[in-house]
Amino acid sequence: MEILNQLGNLALGSVPTIILFLLLIGAYSFLVRRPLERTLAERRVRTTGAVEQAREAISAAEAETTAYENKLRAARAQIAALREGRLKEWQQKRELALAGARAKAQEHIGIARKEIEISAGAARKQIEDATGMLSEQIVRAVLPAGVQGPATEGARS
């Protein structure tokens, strides 16, 4: 019985400690745990929001990068087309200039051929005219002075 008395006194003495402990737990949950949980929940929301915003910003940046790359490709294609057009235009101008130069060269060649033919004709005529005189001179030089050759007789008659 004495043990029961001691247990009762002990239980009665522990009641204020239990009450203080329960008050301490209540104060802890009211003063520390709830504000801490609210702060952590708010941080989680902000972090999640920031991560989502970062993902959205990355997606937007990727979309802008894709659009920029497409514009860059289009600009490069346009530049290549312009360059190709200019090259074709320059080639056409060059071909026209070459054709003109060829035509002028052919014209000069034709004129030179005609001049050569005229000069050759004149030279032939001059050679033919000089042939008679030269043959007469040769005959005079080869034959003695008193003998007349057939070329000189024909010339005297």
Image (tube, rainbow, N blue to C red):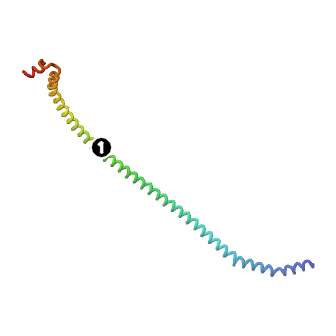
Disc 1 residue type?
Answer: Leu
In this view, which residue lies farthest toward the front? Answer: 145
For residue 132, above or below residue 73: above
Count the labels in the image: 1
Question: Where residue 69 appears, x then y in whole percent?
Answer: 47, 57
Q: Nearer the viewer, residue 154 or 42?
A: 154
* Quadrant showing the N terminus: bottom right
Give the side of residue 58 with respect to residue 76, left or right. right
Instruction: Point out the residue furthest to the right here.
Output: 1
Where 99 falls versus 152 (above or below)? below
- Give the quarter of the image for residue 152: top left
Q: Position of residue 107 (x, y in %)?
A: 23, 40
Which sits in the foreground, 2 or 128?
128
Residue 145 point in image, percent of width and height = 13, 20
Question: In which quadrant is the C terminus drawn?
Answer: top left
Q: Nearer the viewer, residue 59 or 113?
A: 113
Q: Is residue 49 above or below residue 124?
A: below
In the rendered image, the residue lying farthest to the left is 157
The residue depicted at 75 percent of the width and 79 percent of the height is 24
Residue at (17% x, 32% y) in the render: 122
The structure residue drawn at horizontal position 14% and vertical position 26%, both measured from the top left corner, is 133
Q: Is residue 68 left or right of residue 120?
A: right
Check disc 1 and report the residue beneath it. Answer: 98
Mark 1 residue element:
helix
Mark 1 burial class by Cα count in 10 Å: few <14, some 14-19, many 20+ = few
Image quadrant of residue 99? top left
Residue 34 image point, x, y percent: 67, 75
